[in-house]
Amino acid sequence: MEDVYFTLGIRGLLSAAVMLFSVYLAWVVLQELKLDVFLKQPKSRRAVMLRLMMAVAIGYLFSRFILDYWEWSTSLRLLVE
């Protein structure tokens, strides 16, 4: 039973790390976009908050894809065993 808890803990730690890395990666990529065309004041707090929210949303979607793909690929191994 301890092994199950340890596996769940490792999976949770890995999921959190992938999520944070994905949000960071989305933030870096969003910095390269020229959003000045769409925003009145691109350096304001609201513009930074918008970029942060976009980074969280995009990072979440990307990390869910990665984590779901990882889960599906590990589940497929059960078909062979």
Image (cartoon, helix red, strand yellow):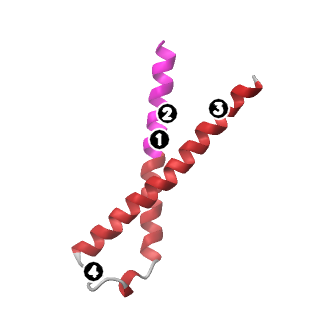
**CB contact under 8 Å: marks 2 and 3:** no
**Disc 4 residue type?**
Lys
Mark 3 residue element: helix
Point out which mark residue 11 bears. 2
* Helix, strand or loop for the magenta stretch, by majority: helix
Q: Which residue is mark 3?
A: 75
Labels 2 and 1 touching (C-beta < 8 A): yes
Magenta-drawn stretch contains 15: yes
Q: Which residues are magenta?
A: 1-17
Q: Is residue 58 above or below residue 30?
A: above
Q: Secondary structure at mark 4?
A: loop
Give the CA separation, mark 1 to mark 3.
17 Å
Residue with the mark numbered 4: 43
- Name the residue tied to disc 1: 15
| Marks 2 and 3, how far apart at CA | 14 Å
Around disc 4, counting alpha carbons within 10 Å, would you say few (fewer than 14), some (14 to 19), or many (20 or more)? few
Identify the image quadrant of the C terminus. top right
Choose the circle earlier in sequence order: 1 or 4. 1
As drawn, which residue projects farthest toward the right?
80
Q: Residue 2: x and y, percent?
A: 47, 14
Instruction: Give the side of residue 68 with respect to residue 30, left or right.
Output: right
